[in-house]
Image (cartoon, helix red, strand yellow):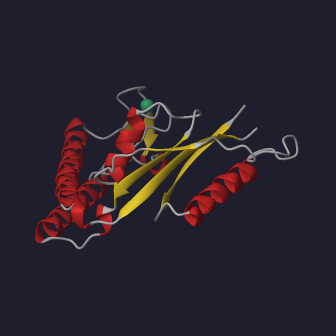
């Protein structure tokens, strides 16, 4: 028994849109399932149940979906405001730029603190005690036990940048959702189907 999940975004709820969704799910199931053993695969798709309330954004719709138990019972259709495609306000632009800056800082810091830049040729792993030639270390992981070989300070700094990015991304989302009245309504369709 295996199941397959996926999602697609519909522009509307016309017959044409729903027929497209049905075809999409059906062909996804048939392309991934064992149609030799189960020739009727994709013929009996789960019903689509639509939520009435329009979510404020794509993320908002995803969070709603996560809070519901729909998988393998029915496929879920959630209307949402497509705030990712509205004209940016000054505040949004500013937040976007701050995210980009923070990402640049993070990338530069990660590059700078890579084990490849350590002075010594061999690096000791504090976890398993191996002494490893720098040339065999990728992504700062110990090739023996997978331990992250970077210093605590480095890891803390990396996490601080990541937290900053998360924080600003959240601010941006709140700002976008405030403008949801300017956004078009779209439909997030989540499915999980039996594929043999
Ligand atoms: Zn190790």
Q: Residue furthest top?
A: 128
* Residue 81 locus on image (x, y percent): 32, 58
In the image shown, does 12 or 86 lie closer to the viewer?
A: 12
Tell me if residue 185 comes above or below residue 33 in the rendering.
Answer: below
Residue 120 is at least partly visible in this image: no
In the image shown, does 184 or 112 lie closer to the viewer?
A: 184
Tell me if residue 107 comes above or below residue 6 in the rendering.
Answer: below
* Residue 186 locus on image (x, y percent): 40, 60
* Residue 134 locus on image (x, y percent): 42, 47
Residue 154 is at least partly visible in this image: yes
Residue occupying the point 35% across, 38% down: 149
Residue occupying the point 38% across, 26% down: 127
Q: Residue furthest bottom?
A: 87
Residue occupying the point 15% across, 70% down: 89
Tell me if residue 187 comes above or below residue 72 in the rendering.
Answer: below
* Residue 14 locus on image (x, y percent): 53, 63
In the image shown, does 113 or 129 lie closer to the viewer?
A: 113
Q: Is residue 195 left or right of residue 122?
A: right
Report the number of numbered marks. Answer: 0
Quarter of the rendered structure image containing ligand 1: top left
Q: Is residue 93 left or right of residue 81?
A: left
* Residue 33, quarter of the rendered image: top right
Quarter of the image for the C terminus: give it: top right
Quarter of the image for the N terminus: give it: top right
């Amino acid at each position: 028994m295996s199941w397959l999940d996926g999602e697609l975004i519909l522009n509307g709820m016309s017959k044409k849109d729903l027929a497209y969704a049905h075809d999409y799910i059906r062909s996804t199931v048939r392309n991934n399932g064992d149609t030799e053993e189960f020739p009727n695969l994709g013929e009996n798709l789960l019903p689509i149940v639509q939520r009435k309330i329009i979510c404020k954004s794509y993320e908002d719709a995803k969070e709603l979906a996560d809070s519901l138990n729909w998988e393998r019972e029915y496929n879920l259709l959630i209307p949402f405001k497509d705030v990712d495609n509205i004209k940016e306000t000054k505040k949004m632009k500013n937040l976007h730029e701050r995210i980009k800056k923070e990402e640049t800082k993070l990338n530069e810091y990660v590059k700078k603190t890579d084990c490849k830049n350590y002075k010594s040729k061999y690096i000791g792993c504090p976890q398993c005690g191996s002494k490893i030639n720098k040339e065999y270390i990728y992504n700062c992981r110990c090739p023996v036990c997978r331990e992250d070989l970077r210093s605590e300070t480095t890891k803390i700094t990396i996490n601080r940048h990541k937290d900053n990015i998360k924080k600003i991304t959240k601010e941006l989302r709140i700002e976008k959702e405030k403008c949801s009245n300017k956004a078009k309504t779209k439909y997030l369709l989540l499915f999980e189907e039996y594929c043999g």
